[in-house]
Amino acid sequence: MSGTTPKIRLRGVKKSFGPKKVLDGVDLDVQAGHGMVILGGSGSGKSVTIKSILGLIPPDSGVIEVDGRNVLSMNRRQREELNDRIGMLFQNAALFDSLPVWENVCFKLLAQKRIARSKARDKAAEILAQVGLDGSVGDLSPSELSGGMQKRVGLARAIATQPDIIFFDEPTTGLDPIMGAVIDGLIVDCVKRLGATAVSITHDMASARRIGDTAAMIHKGRIVWTGPAATLGETGNAMVDQFARGVREGPITMELRK
Ligand SMILES: Nc1ncnc2c1ncn2[C@@H]1O[C@H](COP(=O)(O)OP(=O)(O)OP(=O)(O)O)[C@@H](O)[C@H]1O
Ligand SMILES: [Mg+2]
């Protein structure tokens, strides 16, 4: 390990919902300026992990640090200041239905008074272009968009403030393969050009290799493997390789049958 403080550090993070244990001691380090990809089966706790870092789901125990600071002991103002530097693409896009697309995209910029309302429509058009959408989409309501378009608007909203940490929860799910590759390129760009730290959840292995420097696999509420994303499929870890190759037979299947 290098001596530098990780951008994000989790130790022993646990979370149960009623009797259901979801996170059972998650340990994770994300280095600054890196792309981290989190893999794992459906319901394994990937979204809950990200939401716990964001402060949306308080863990039952454990440590979560950003830039070496314990986020769980922050007061509301400190937490808000931190979240101002974090962008998030939710798994279901989670757009505000009552607002037109342009206002969704510029929501944080407007809330933080970083741009004038009169400039927001043009600014939104600029950001929408980066995710392959025409500026005229800005005047539509989220309910008028296809699923893939909603995803891209969610992505535009996540990057609008040029945050230094960005969470992408399944950024390419529901997109066609070409748009998926475009979005991956955008994520890589955010990480490399803006120097952001990106944590992405994905089921798409081609995407994982493109956007991840490092990958981590979560299984039964713990991180069971971390390593270079480029090695996915031939890591030598039977569970990770089974997942990456999407084959039925292997350690994960055997556990499902029990
Ligand atoms: N707010 C909540 N209240 C109760 N249970 C929850 C809540 N959020 C998540 N869970 C449960 O925690 C478990 C993990 O959920 P999570 O959304 O993290 O899965 P995931 O790994 O992101 O799966 P997927 O790949 O399907 O998105 C699930 O069993 C889910 O039902
Ligand atoms: Mg999820």
Image (cartoon, rainbow, N blue to C red):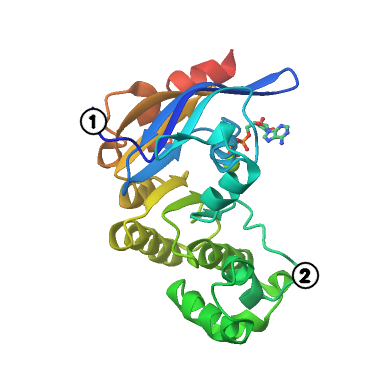
Secondary structure beneath disc 2?
Answer: loop
- Residue at coordinates 49% horizontally, 65% vertically from top-left? 161
Closest to the observer, 109 or 105: 109
Alpha carbon distance from label 1 to label 2: 47 Å
Which residue lies at the image location 62% right of the left edge and 28% below the top edge?
59
40 with respect to 73 (left or right): left
Q: Position of residue 227 (x, y in %)?
A: 29, 32
Q: Decide if residue 249 is on the left or right side of residue 258.
A: left
User: Looking at the image, which residue is at 62% across and 77% down?
Assistant: 102
Tag 2: residue type?
Answer: Ser
| Residue 140 at x, y percent in the picture | 68, 80
- Disc 1: CA contacts within 10 A as few (<14), some (14-19) or many (>=20): few
Q: Is residue 41 above or below residue 78?
A: above
> For the N terminus, which image quadrant?
top left
| Residue carrying label 2 | 98
Q: Which quadrant is home to the C terminus?
A: top right
Pointer 1: what residue? 3
User: Is 110 rendered above or below residue 77?
Assistant: below
Q: Earlier in the sequence, mark 1 or mark 2?
A: 1
- Residue 27 shows in the view: yes
Mark 1: amino acid: Gly
| Pointer 2 residue Cβ closer than 8 Å to ligand 1 | no
Image side of residue 10 versus residue 16, left or right:
left
Toward the viewer: 256 or 59?
A: 59
Disc 1 on helix, strand or loop? loop
Give me the disc on residue 115. none
Q: Quadrant of ligand 1?
A: top right
Q: Nearer the viewer, mark 1 or mark 2?
A: 1
Residue 210 as seen in the image, left or right of residue 122: left
Residue 231 picture quarter: top left
The answer, for residue 247, to whether it is visible in the render is no
